[in-house]
Amino acid sequence: MTARAADRARYDRATAHLDAPLALVDLDAFDANAEDLVRRAGGKPIRVASKSVRCRTLLERVLAKDGFAGIMSFTLAESLWLARSGFEDILLAYPSADRAAFAELAADPKLAAAVTVMVDDVSQLDLIDGARGEGSEVIRVCLELDTALKLFGGRVRVGALRSPLHSPAQVADVARAVSRRPGFKLVGIMAYEGHIAGVGDAVAGRPFRSRAIRLMQSTARRELAERRAAVVRAVRAVVPDLEYVNGGGTGSVQHTAAEDAVTEIAAGSGLYVPRLFDNYTSFSGRPAALFAQPVVRRPGVGIVTVLGGGYPASGAAGPDRLPVPYLPEGLRYDPQEGPGEVQTPLLGSPADDLLIGDKVWFRHAKAGELCERFDVLHLVEGDTVTTTVPTYRGEGRTFL
C-alpha cells in the first residue's frame, strides 16, 4: 500500500460516520508542517498569516508552539474580531478603507494596543483621521515596501502590484510623515516577496520555465536583500525604536530569515500545504487540509460523478487554480467539464472501484480559501476525528 493509499484508508475510517461534502485537517501533518516552518526560520519568529488558516482553533494551536508569535490578518474587521477574542499582536497586512472599523479602533485602548494597520500612502492617514470620530487612541502603523524586481530601467517589473514605496528614500519620507503626525506611531516595516515566496520553481513538465523562475528568484533575492537592508537603515534613522521588520512567505522562509535586516517571518499556507506548494525545490510539506465529495453517479465504465467540487482559487485564472482529485490516486477531470459547482465527473480506472456514497478526496489550490466553502473542519489524528471546529464561515464571519 502506498503512503497516499494508507492516508485514504485513514481518512475514510475517520469519517465513516460523516456524510460528504466535508473538509478535514490532518493534525499530524499540520504539526509536522509547523515544525518544518520553524526549522527553516532558523530562530526567527513566524507571524501566522490568518488568511491561510481561517480557523480560530487552529490559529490558537499553532501560536501555542515555540517559534510562532503574532498574527498577520487580512481585513481590519477580522483584526478587531481576533483582538476581541483574545489574540494579541495583530498586523493587518493590507491597507483598509473600513471607516467604521477605524472608528472602533481609535476608540478602544485594548484594540489600539493589539492591532497594527498597514500604510503605504499619506492619504491613508487622512482617511483614518477622518474616521476617528471621538476616538483618540494612538494608531500603530506599519509601512509596506514594494518588493518587485525592476529591470531595464523599470521597463520590466516582476512582482505583485502592491505598495508604491520602492526606494529607501520613498519609505523614509512616509516614515517621517507618520512620525510627525499626532495620533500615529510607526512600529514596523513589512515586505512580502510574492514572486519568490508564492511562485513554485519546479513546474512539472516545464524544465525551461522552471530554470527561468529559479534564475529570476535568485536575482530578485539578491536585489531585495540589499534594498530591504537600505530601507531599514533609512527608516531606523527616523524611528530608531522600530519593533519589527517582517518579510517572506511559506516559499521563501529560509532565504528571508537569512537576511540580518529581517526580524520576523510571515507564513501560513505551509501549515495546510495546498497544491500550489507542490512545485518548490526549497521545501516539501505534507498535505494537511483536504475536502471530500460523495460519489452520486456512475455514468459508465471508468467514470464516476461526485457532488460539487468546483472551488477555484483566487488569482490569475488557470488550471493551477483548480482543486485536484487526490484520493484514490489516478482520477482526473473530464476536460470538457472540469470541476463543477453542483457535479463533477471524474475519469480513470479507480472509478470502477467506487460505489455510490463513497468519498473522493480533493486538494484545493490556495490554503485558507477552503474555509470559505465549509462551516467546520474535522480534525483528524491517526484514523479518528478527535474534534470538529468552526471555520471563520462557521462562526458567521465572511470578511471578504
Image: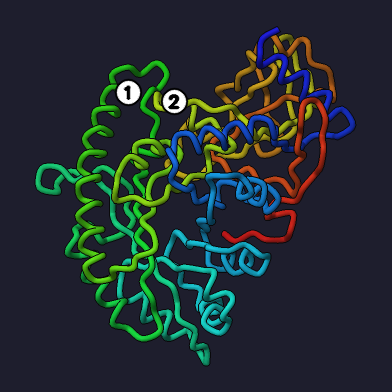
Q: Are marks 1 and 2 in contact (CB under 8 Å)?
A: yes
Q: Where is residue 344 in the image (x, y as percent from the top left)?
A: 68, 29
Residue identified by numbered label 2: 279
Q: Which secondary structure, mark 1?
A: helix
In the picture shown, does residue 17 fall above or below 193?
above
Name the image quarter holding residue 215.
top left
Front position in the image: 289 or 65: 65
In the picture shown, does residue 37 fall above or below 49?
above
Q: Which amino acid does label 2 sit on?
A: Asn
Q: Which residue is found at the position 26% from the left and 39% from the top?
A: 221
Q: Which residue is found at the position 83% from the left and 17% from the top?
A: 355
Q: Position of residue 340 (x, y in %)?
A: 64, 34
Name which of mark 1 and mark 2 comes first in the sequence.
1
Quarter of the image containing the C terminus?
A: bottom right
In the picture shown, does residue 229 fall above or below 296?
below
Residue identified by numbered label 1: 210
Q: In this view, does 101 lie to the left or right of 13?
A: left
